[in-house]
Image: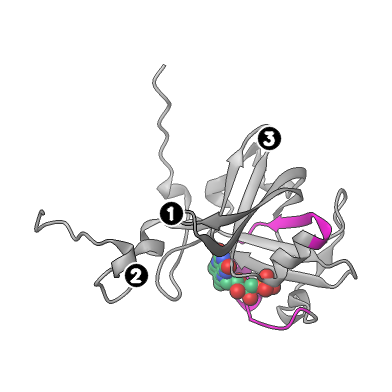
Amino acid sequence: MNDSMHFYQPAQGHGLPHDPFNAIVGPRPIGWISTQNAQGQLNLAPYSFFNAFNYTPPIIGFCSVGAKDSLRNVQETGEFVWNLVTVPLAEKMNLSCAAVPPEINEFELAGLETAASICVKPPRVALSQVAFECRVSQIVQLQSANGLAVPSWLVLGEVVGVHIQRALLKNGVYDTASAQHVLRGGGPGDYFTVTPENLFTMLRPR
Ligand SMILES: Cc1cc2nc3c(=O)[nH]c(=O)nc-3n(C[C@H](O)[C@H](O)[C@H](O)COP(=O)(O)O)c2cc1C
């Protein structure tokens, strides 16, 4: 045991005022996910257990902690759209996480316009500067190390259509640093963004 290191086993509690897990695995990109059910009812919600997992084909995923509307919709239709959250959209993203019944359309709740998708049925957030149209490739229920089922579902989807606002392409290269991506930190409400000053470049060893 080293006194300069706090050690804990999550199953026995962290012994700190706040669980540090989310703050450590962060900041995380946000999966702002639009879906619709078989009847066409729209849904929009943020998921920060979200990331990219493969290049070819491009695959992204988000995790529903508990069976939420987005999960039920992708189970029904096999489609979703990921929408980029940038600083001007942060508050609307936050509004869209309200725990409301499935018949409530979070686009309306947050005052957001939709824009039609091309390859899938769920629309994208019109003001979002980047959107990925996705077809579900796998839905994996998580399990613990000793094989017990966890009520969380990882939804993976192949990106079949990509929308990028041309202003974010500088000489054809996507400019992450100036796009003002919003990233989730820890605690009840910490977020980060990136600015050009945060950029550093490091090439892999050859
Ligand atoms: C920034 C942010 C990130 C979130 N990340 C997740 C997540 O990764 N998984 C999850 O189950 N809920 C997450 N939530 C909560 C869901 O957005 C919330 O439960 C929402 O009501 C789910 O909507 P739905 O039932 O329409 O799918 C997050 C909320 C916010 C604001």
Residue at image coords 70%, 56%: 82
The answer to whether the beta carbon of the residue marked 2 is less than 8 Å from any atom of ligand 1 is no
Residue extent of the magenta highlight = 76-102
Mark number, residue 172? 3
Q: Secondary structure at mark 1?
A: loop
- In the rendered structure, which amino acid carries the disc numbered 1? Asn
Say which label, 3 or 1, has the lower sequence index: 1
Give the mark toward the camera: 3 or 2: 2
The three-letter amino acid code for the residue at tag 2 is Asp
Which badge, 1 or 2, comes first in the chain's sequence?
A: 2
Question: Where residue 138 sits: x, y (%)?
Answer: 69, 48
155 sits to left or right of 162: left
Which residue matches tag 1? 146
User: Which quadrant of the rendered structure holds the N terminus?
Assistant: bottom left
Which image quadrant is residue 76 in? bottom right
Mark 3 touching mark 2, by CB under 8 A? no
Between label 3 and label 1, give the one nearer the viewer: 1
x, y percentage for residue 44? 72, 69
Ligand 1 is found in which quarter of the picture?
bottom right
Q: Is residue 125 visible?
A: no
Instruction: Verify whether residue 166 appears in magenta.
Output: no
- Going from N to C along the chain, the mark reached first, 3 or 2, is 2
Indicate the quadrant containing the C terminus: top left, top right, bottom left or bottom right: top left
* Mark sitting on residue 19: 2
Task: Indicate whether 63 appears above or below 90.
Answer: above
Side of 51 relative to 32 (left or right): left
Mark 2 neighbour class, 10 Å CA radius: few under 14, some 14 to 19, many 20 or more: some
